[in-house]
Amino acid sequence: MAITTQRRKERIDRGINVRTEGIYALMSIKELSYLAAPRLVLIVGLLILPLLLPDMYWKRVITITCIYAFLALSFDFLAHFVGLVSLGGAFFVGIGGYLAAIANTYWGFPPWLTIPFAALVGGAVCTLLLFPCLPLRGVYFAIVSLMYPLFSARVIEALDIFGGTDGIMGIDGFSNHFVEEYAPLGLLLIALFAIRRLVTTDFGLVLRGVKDNDQAIRASGMNVTFYKSVAVYIASTMGCLSGAILVHIYMWSGISLFALDFSILPIAATVIGGSGTLIGPVLGCFILVPISELLRDFGTLRIVFYALILVGFIIFRSEGLMVWGQRKYHQFERWTQI
Amino acid sequence: MNNQPLLEAKEITKAFGGIMALNRVSFTVNAGEILGIIGPNGSGKTTIVNCLTGFIKMTSGHVFFRGRDISKKPPHKIADMGLTRTFQIMRPYYSLPAYKNLVIPLFSPRAKRTGGWRGGGRLGDRNTVGIDILEEIGFERDSYVPYKTASTLPTGYLKRLELARCLALKPEVIICDEIFSGLSMSEIASMVPLIERLQMEGITLIMIEHRLRELFRVANRVMVLNFGEKLIEGHPKEVMADERVKEAYFGSQNMAEVMMHA
């Protein structure tokens, strides 16, 4: 009888005291850096990125990447923590962008006022308009939310309001390049860590409960629609914020703000980065958007190479970069015989 | 006012298309008692639970809880008033640890009102309170069971988790939808004292059951349903002796003997 030895991979948590409860995290530099290093790498890495890239073109690419990163963050938050798969990214950008444009050109608000205004009011507008769809879940919500950007663009085109197909021109830009580069980056980092904190609170736990099992939430005496609308408000505020920033960068607002790129690319970034990690989708954007720019040299073949890279990621790192990275960081692996 | 029943159902009717799942069913539940609802498969037991707690809208009829008409209220409002339910098919938050499953109901408006604490107060944060409730209901505190993900827990613990979710709300009424089904005899044996203790603590229970022997040990009154209609209501012994009940369950006379030994 042939003896076949079977092996399996064993994963063991690294022996770090930080894992245990208490004050161990503060006991040594090693433990402290184990916790702080990944976060510092991310924060410092993002902040020095504009300094490393000398030419204006790439600095602009970084800023546009931030726009997508906001959308990816909002998509991942809604899809993974609330169970609403939203294809409404373009809708958020459009509403936020147009609100900022109107506030700036019609009412004369300066950019530092239009951006928070567009984010907060735009979030409310988006939540109100999406409210009738909130009982839907998963892919059904996705289909309906995809309708909103298409619908809005057609309404503006047909009624010829807000400049119609020409869009709104003459919007103020940022006062200087430094603000233009660092305002989106800073806000992105704040949003990222705020959402990460939010999902671990008791409120975030209820949101996860809504995704897992909304009947049990109802049976616990909580209004599912209320929690869903709060989550949609948070997500659409981030989307509108990015739209408002975009409008001030381009100094123009038009129906291309409702382009489906804003709905689709964040999803691709989430697949690459690892869904549910929040940081993964942001990193995914910082990979995908620059790659897409680099591929411009290939002309019409660009989309082919872009698709190949995406397929490669899905086949070889289907769990997502960040999930893989976190596992490698927190655990080591070895082969054991069964 | 003292004579007023805690929960009163008046001629509840529910039709799914042409099928009458419930046909003018009326009953009352007094504070502190345990009402059993039994009946063959498809007789409308779970539909009653869904109608009482607002999970489905009834075609006609009224439900009064503490004298207030709750028949048009949404489920979360009804649960907020203290009328809670468990699900026959357990509905825990599968991706969360058992004690985190309780943090969610503890976050609800009713728990904040009735718990006498606001997270981090005298009784500790919601995690601590959650583990306390789990221990009360039979999760071993010092073991790893309360910390395990709900998807890895066996049926017995999940049934207890369903009850614990209701208890987190400090309810007045718990409607248990087949809390004994799918459990082993020893698991049921440990569950019965739990039910008795809940009654001692003043919680009113409505129990939908197929396990008649265990139900009759704890129930004060039993109501029998068949094809959406109320057959009889009364003391467990009277109900067992009734010919119509035997017929509904077994369809023939000679099988009735089995019922007597159940």
Image (tube, coloured by chain):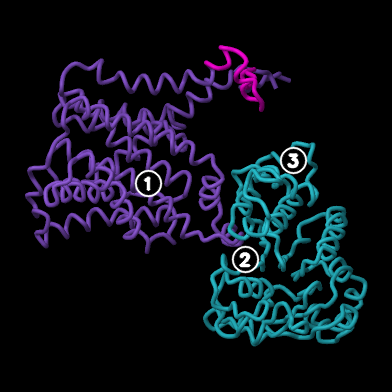
Chain colours: A purple, B cyan
Callout 1: helix, strand or loop? helix
Q: Residue B255's spot in the image, x, y percent? A: 87, 78
In terms of depth relative to the viewer, which is nearer, B221 or A98? A98
Q: Nearer the viewer, residue B10 or A97?
A: A97
Chain hosting mark 3: B
Labels in figure, total? 3
Residue at 79% over, 82% down:
B251
Q: CA distance from mark 3 to mark 2?
A: 27 Å
Query: Please, is residue B191 above or below residue B241 in the view?
Result: above
- The chain under label 1 reads A
Say which mark, if any, is on residue A153.
Answer: none
Depth-wise, is mark 3 or mark 2 nearer the camera? 2
In this rendering, position of residue B257 left or right of residue B19: right
Q: Position of residue A298 (x, y in %)?
A: 16, 25
Q: What's the distance in space between the residues labelled 2 and 1, CA to CA?
A: 29 Å
Side of B61 relative to B220 (left or right): left
Q: Quadrant of residue A195?
A: top left
Disc number for residue A235: 1
Image: magenta residue range = A12-33
Q: Which residue is mark 2?
A: B79
> Which amino acid lies under the numbered mark 2 shown in the image of this protein?
Ala
Q: Is residue B34 left or right of residue B163?
A: right
